Amino acid sequence: MAEPLEAEIRRRIGLAGPMPISEFMSLCLGHPQHGYYVTRDPFGSSGDYVTSPEISQMFGELIGLWAAAVWRQMGAPAEVRLIELGPGRGTMMLDMLRAANVMPDFRKSVAVDLVETSPLLMERQKRTLGNLGIPIAWHASLADVPDGPAIIVANEFFDALPVNQAVKQADGWHERVVGIGEKDKLAFGIGPIALKFFAQTLPPQVRMAETGSIYEWRSDTQPLELGRRVVRGGGGALIVDYGHVESIIGDTFQALRGQRKADPLAAPGAADLTAHVDFQALGSTAEGLGARVHGPLDQATFLRRLGIEQRAINLKRVAPPDKASAIDVALGRLTAGGPTGMGSRFKVMGLSAPEIATLPGFEA
Ligand code: SAH
């Protein structure tokens, strides 16, 4: 017997035919009863994956100091919105606000807005952040956050937004879909009709790809909203995620379960689904609205420029001796290079209003 979400997906395919990857992903992650983020807390060492803020408090603290510096660059407005997209357990925001204590004027000016769709994680965020004496509001999407001067941060948010895939065929690009295949299993397929006007929108390096190539894009409007807000609010944004610096071809749609790669179609709703972030697409969307783009840089480079090494030394000085080595291990994980290291796989991109020429950490 199929699990309830798989049954629902099969029902929809039965009615309307194979569905785009984005629809499948959005059901698996966000279905109101059975979605992955709706039914579980995937973070931490026992969860499906561990994110940078869960590895060490240093990560959020440095980003908190980054935000305080951006606030200064904005002319230290008396009220600023500190917006986080997809805050998970609320750990990064907690560490950011603690670090902000060293700049009381900044801390006093802050109201926090959290963009979150999972009721379960919202509860978790309330527990983490509810007693700090800072106003906090929750929103389903960035578009729902009131306007005004804002600093926006997002770690591992954009990779969780639904992705579409197109496959190059002799007669053009076709949408990649999820349907019913052999032995009555969920299977990838290729939509019957070429996507109209699709090739014109592609960067040249993608347009020339060979038959069979896969190209990914996101139609979510939050990148547009991000650019608009940064420009209108005179502020800055920081996006940390894994992905590619330039738009390229390739299938990066993947499932993670118990910290291992899994078949994305195997257990709808029980595995985390992600796809790489296309930083070129994100950056040019914001640029098109008049924002300045900074980076992307490797996470390791960015964290070192913000002083993570010194921060680790200071923390070790006050830590009990048995905790000191854990600080070094965390530092190593956040800044590790090579194909699997978080320090090189994760990229950091800044966006700012045009009047802010450089953001902290991105200076050449
Ligand atoms: N930033 C956190 C969590 C990353 S996981 C960390 O680094 O630990 C992705 C987060 O985005 C989760 O909180 C998830 O519930 C939320 N999320 C996923 N899709 C979303 C969407 N479409 N709108 C709002 N939040 C979303």
Image (cartoon, grey):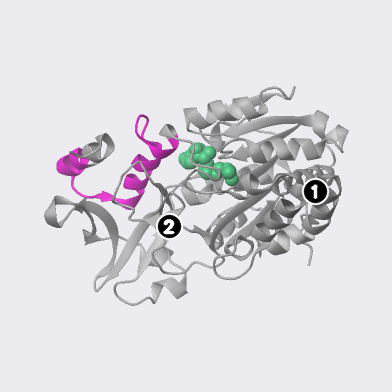
Crowd class of label 2 (few under 14; some 14 to 19; many from 20; radius 10 Å): some
Please say if 207 is above or below 31.
below
Residue 233 in view of the camera: yes
Label 1 CB, ligand 1: below 8 Å? no
Q: Amino acid at mark 2?
A: Trp
Residue bearing the label numbered 2: 217
Q: Which residues are magenta?
A: 10-37
Q: Main secondary structure of the magenta part?
A: helix
- Name, please, the residue furthest toward the front: 322
Residue visible at 70% across and 35% down?
A: 94
Which numbered dot is residue 321? Answer: 1
Q: Position of residue 338 (x, y in %)?
A: 59, 71
Please say if 132 is above or below 207.
above
Secondary element at image label 2 = strand
C-alpha separation, residue under disc 1 versus residue under disc 2: 48 Å
> Is 302 included in the stretch rendered in magenta?
no
Residue 292 in view of the camera: no
Q: Position of residue 305 (x, y in %)?
A: 78, 60
Which numbered dot is residue 101? Answer: none
Q: Amino acid at mark 1?
A: Pro
The quarter in which the C terminus is drawn is bottom right
Q: Position of residue 285 (x, y in %)?
A: 55, 55
> Is 21 included in the stretch rendered in magenta?
yes
The quarter in which the N terminus is drawn is top left
Looking at the rendered image, the disc whose residue lies closer to the viewer, 1 or 2, is: 1
Earlier-in-chain disc, 1 versus 2 = 2
Secondary element at image label 1 = helix
